[in-house]
Amino acid sequence: MTTTARAGATTAPAAGPAVRWPDDWNTVLDTALTTWDGAWDTRRVQRLFLARYGRGLFRADARAALSARARAGLLVLHDQPNHRIYTLKDGTR
């Protein structure tokens, strides 16, 4: 069996290089978490990334960054219906 491309059909673009994180991103996020009071959610992390680097950050990446810090013991997860909020764990400043 042979396959032929249909006229006008587009092919999927080749996968590009993996996303490269800025070298200081972990330091920037950890400093912000311990310096600025209040609750952290994915939107706040996205705004921090945009302000620092001038480009956007996917929500899933922001969520992964916050949950990794919660697993490490830096943040506490307050799981609300349809919204996850993280706060700094007591005594981690």
Image (spheres, rainbow, N blue to C red):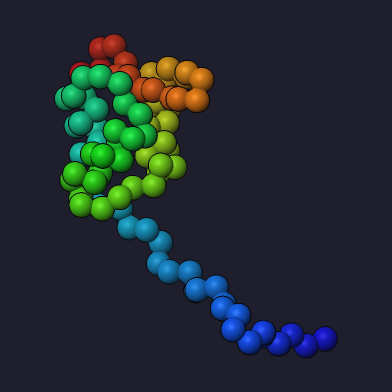
Query: Is residue 55 shown to the viewer in this render?
Result: yes
Q: Is residue 1 left or right of residue 23?
A: right
In this picture, is 35 found above or below 65? above
Using the rendered view, name the quadrant where residue 20 is placed: bottom left
Question: Can you name the residue that lies furthest to the top here?
Answer: 90
Q: How many labels does the image show?
A: 0
| Image quarter in which the C terminus is found | top left
At x 59%, y 84%, the residue is 8
Observer able to see residue 72 = no
In the rendering, at what x and y percent does residue 13 appear?
50, 73
Left-right relation of 70 to 82 = left
> Residue 67, relative to residue 55: is it above or below?
above
Quick check: 58 above or below 39? below
Residue placed furthest toward the right = 1
Please provide percent x and percent y for residue 71: 43, 27
- The residue positioned 42% from the left and 20% from the top of the image is 77
Percent of width and height locating residue 91: 25, 12
At x 45%, y 25%, the residue is: 83
Residue 46 in the image, given as x and y percentages of width and height: 30, 40
Task: Report the quarter where the N terminus lies.
Answer: bottom right
